């Protein structure tokens, strides 16, 4: 059985109140009329204050009431219909008050202040018997109904109870019990679950509240887990960054050492070759001077002088030709290929750097460990091991040709 539980009448009343409110809006301030309300000759209404503001704006030379001197009256136009309103020396105070509108405003405010459930409660009418209010409760069908439905309608064979009693029973519980013979001869054992001493609705509310508390606790716990995850992730990122920075420092240090080894041998070889260049240059310079001296001796016209110097020149030439110029860099001396390195295995090792698996307990009899603790310590890089696997640092190969 369906009932109009006040929704349609309540909506109709709300629409009526809304329409009434529109009729009680002042066209000047666009709010509900403020008493006193005055009616103009054109039958439109204004707040006296708003009417006075319009009148003062239209008659700036008109003095306020009680000034004693001034013009005898004034005029202004109705803001709703533009009808010209002529006032006497009393101004807007000479306009008649609309007591009917003021009373309607009072009634409207009283109706608006009433609780919604009180209005709805008065409008609970039976859908089958439109003029009958719903005032009893069918215990078998668990539905509110009216008296005519109990006498002539679908609930004539059902057990019923007064609506306030069922309301009180369901909401707060009735420690006195129902007694015997409530509303139609039914036995108390037939009382449905709805009328148990402890209300199902109250129990449901308590259950929902308890469930909400548990859910809120879970949410709070998960939010804390999120914050812990973020903090642990930040720490691990910082830890990983430091380990890789350490690896980069080791590589930079080793790079510097190897470059210094290359620079030392480069400098030694260059110094040796430059020394040979100076030695050969000095020999060349001495030989050139000796040739120049011998040429000058060949041009000597005096035989005695020529014979006197020729023997000495021959000896110098002989000594000069005996000087050995065999000291020179060996073939391939300029090569620096022995300083080449192979880092392919190291690069491959670096590419395999990964997080360490979770460490198993040393004693299996201790049982499983809490995986939520120590995760940050377990997820460390194998950077030190990778650095140690590179092996001992290779010293630069010495030159197959001795350094001179």
Image: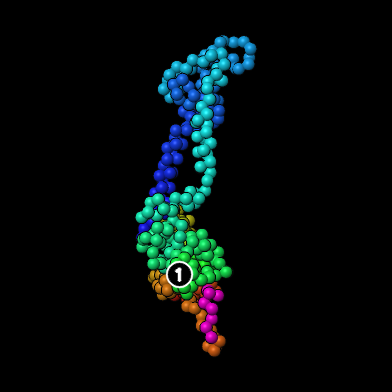
User: What residue is disc 1 on?
Assistant: 185
344 sits to left or right of 163: left
Bin the neighbour count of mark 1 within 10 Å (Cα to Cα): few under 14, some 14-19, many 20 and up: few
Q: Residue at x 54, y 78 (%)?
A: 370
Q: Main secondary structure of the magenta part?
A: loop
Depth check, front residue: 303 or 264? 264
Q: Position of residue 85 (x, y in %)?
A: 47, 17
Q: Range of the magenta residues?
A: 367-375
Q: How is the image coloured?
A: rainbow
Depth check, front residue: 103 or 128? 128
> Is residue 368 positioned above or below 59 on the image?
below
| 401 in magenta | no
Depth check, front residue: 154 or 3? 154
Q: Residue at x 49, y 75 (%)?
A: 382
Q: Position of residue 130 (x, y in %)?
A: 38, 51
Q: Residue at x 36, y 61 (%)?
A: 153
As helix, strand or loop, the secondary structure at mark 1 comes to loop
Taking the view exactly as shown, the residue that stands out farthest to the bottom is: 365
Label count reads 1
């Amino acid at each position: 059985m369906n009932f109009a539980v006040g929704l349609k009448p309540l909506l109709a009343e709300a629409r009526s109140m809304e329409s009434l409110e529109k009729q009680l809006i002042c066209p000047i301030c666009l709010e509900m009329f403020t008493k006193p309300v005055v009616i103009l000759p054109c039958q439109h209404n204004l707040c006296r204050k708003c009417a006075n503001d319009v009148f003062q704006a239209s008659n700036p030379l008109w003095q306020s009431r009680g000034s004693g001197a001034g013009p005898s009256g004034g005029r202004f136009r109705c803001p709703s219909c533009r009808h010209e309103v002529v006032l006497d020396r009393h101004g807007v105070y000479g306009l008649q008050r609309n007591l009917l509108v003021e009373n309607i405003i009072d009634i409207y405010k009283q109706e608006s202040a009433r609780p919604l459930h009180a209005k709805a409660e008065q409008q609970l009418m039976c859908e089958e018997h439109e003029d009958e209010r719903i005032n009893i409760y069918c215990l078998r069908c668990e539905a509110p109904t009216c008296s005519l439905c109990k006498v002539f309608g679908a609930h004539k064979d059902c057990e019923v109870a007064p609506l306030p009693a069922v309301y009180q029973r369901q909401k707060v519980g009735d420690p006195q019990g129902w007694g015997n013979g409530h509303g139609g001869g039914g036995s108390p054992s037939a009382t449905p679950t709805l009328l148990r001493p402890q209300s199902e609705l109250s129990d449901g509310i308590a259950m929902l509240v308890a469930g909400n508390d548990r859910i809120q606790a879970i949410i709070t716990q998960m939010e804390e887990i999120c914050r812990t995850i973020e903090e642990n992730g930040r720490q691990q990122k910082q830890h990983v960054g430091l380990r890789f920075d350490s690896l980069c420092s080791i590589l930079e240090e080793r790079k510097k050492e190897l470059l210094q080894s290359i620079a030392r041998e480069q400098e030694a070889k260059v110094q040796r070759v430059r020394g040979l260049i100076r030695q050969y240059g000095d020999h060349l310079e001495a030989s050139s001077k000796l040739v120049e001296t011998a040429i000058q001796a060949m041009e000597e016209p005096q035989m005695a002088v020529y014979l006197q110097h020729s023997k000495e020149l021959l000896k110098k030439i002989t000594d000069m030709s005996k000087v050995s110029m065999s000291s020179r860099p060996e073939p391939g001396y300029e090569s620096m290929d022995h300083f080449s390195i192979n880092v392919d295995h190291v690069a491959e090792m670096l590419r395999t750097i990964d997080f360490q698996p979770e460490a198993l307990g040393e004693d299996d009899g201790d049982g499983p460990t809490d995986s939520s603790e120590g995760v940050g310590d377990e997820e460390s890089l194998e950077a030190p091991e990778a650095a140690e696997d590179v092996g001992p640092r290779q010293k630069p190969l010495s030159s197959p040709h001795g350094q001179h």
